[in-house]
Amino acid sequence: MLSEGLLVSAPGKVILHGEHAVVHGKVALAVALNLRTFLRLQPHSNGKVGLNLPNIGIKRAWDVARLQHLDTSFLERGDITEKVEKLKEVAGLPEDCTDREHLAVLAFLYLFLSICRKQSALPSLDITVWSELPTGAGLGSSAAYSVCLAAALLTLCEEIPNPLKGGEAASRWTAEDLEVINQWAFQGERVIHGNPSGVDNAVSTWGGALRYQQGKISPLQRPPALKILLTNTKVPRSTKALVLGVRNRLLKFPEIVAPLLTSMDAISLECERVLGEMAAAPAPEHYLVLEELIDMNQHHLNALGVGHASLDQLCQVTMARGLHSKLTGAGGGGCGITLLRPGLEGPEVEATKQALTGCGFDCWETSIGAPGISIHTAASLDAPIRQALGGL
């Protein structure tokens, strides 16, 4: 077992195209969002396992000796619901707790016990996780958390090798090791979500972009990282209600809505084609096509009934500055993305951000197509991140 500390990070995700259409068997394109979750793992010998999640105000610790004597055979049998109930007992949580904060604790315990119990003794350690991602915004924050946990614990227990060599600031695991990380992260996501699609943890593990259709996930040839503004309207919505609304509209107007979904599928496929060309040689005309696709998809999503006045406002503010935006995720509020063309001047971007924050929105300048799970030296991380992880 490794004795030194580990620092890892994983990206969030956004849906570029295919929202709602994917529920009806069409293609969706998911891309890694370069707002990242960072994890610090520090082994020690105080006989405790500590978990610190400063974003959500969670700080818990357990005695290693108590965990060591647990009958952990429940981790291998029964469905995920039974495992979650047993983990609540282990964590000392009430049976009726289902909030995101406590599920994050259970996901940690599940991965810690499942991965580390193969060792002769459970390790004593502290884990701190801090994220740039807002929680509950449909940006894959729980998947990035599960991917970071899986990567750090597997590396600690030498189930996969540490890829960071002397002199490197950051590194990534081999494709084979990434597959192991992804499989474990999916189990963490099951603890949190019950029946996840696997898209979020796959994007967070592999990075770049991937295509998803009817349960089949395949990575795209890595396109260049595209600069975007990510805007959170902060308008709450119910994904379940929005998905049901689209289904009802399809049943009511099949000859109108079915062609819309087919058209949205074609948008995803055309975007996939353009991103493939950009991977080889990006050109200005590619951005013009991407902007057109964004506009068309946003109109289709409005026609499906998943738009919102806040998202219309976002599109109007950016269009007034010659920029193109669409919702990402379920719609009905939530988040939107705005494509930033290369060569766009800093003051123009800043003015757009200020206009959006003036609407009461949160806004980040970031990129999509970012690298997946990575391991870092402390010196390679920005000072605010080191501070958030406990002052490295």
Image: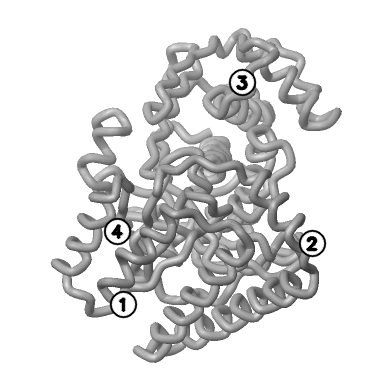
Front residue of 184 and 66: 184
Which label number is shown at residue 30?
none
Marks 3/2: CA–CA distance:
60 Å
Is tag 4's residue or tag 2's residue first in the polypeptide sequence? Answer: 2
Marks 4/2: CA–CA distance:
40 Å
Query: Residue 113 vs residue 252: left or right?
Result: left
Name the residue type under label 3. Answer: Ala
Name the residue type under label 4. Answer: Glu
Is tag 1's residue or tag 3's residue first in the polypeptide sequence? Answer: 3
Q: Position of residue 373 (x, y in %)?
A: 48, 53
Nearest to viewer (mark 4 / mark 2): 2
Is tag 1's residue or tag 2's residue first in the polypeptide sequence? Answer: 2
Q: Position of residue 273 (x, y in %)?
A: 57, 85
User: Which residue occupies the extreme front position in the image?
Assistant: 252
Query: Residue 385 vs residue 222: left or right?
Result: left
> Which residue does the image show at 74% across and 42% down from the upper left?
195
Is tag 1's residue or tag 4's residue first in the polypeptide sequence? Answer: 1
Front residue of 306 and 106: 306
Q: Quadrant of residue 151?
A: top right
Secondary structure beneath dot 3 equals loop
| Residue occupied by mark 1 | 341
| Residue occupied by mark 3 | 121
Which label number is shown at residue 365?
4
> Which residue does the image show at 36% across and 49% down from the upper left?
376
Decide: is 321 above or below 207: below
Secondary structure beneath dot 2 equals helix
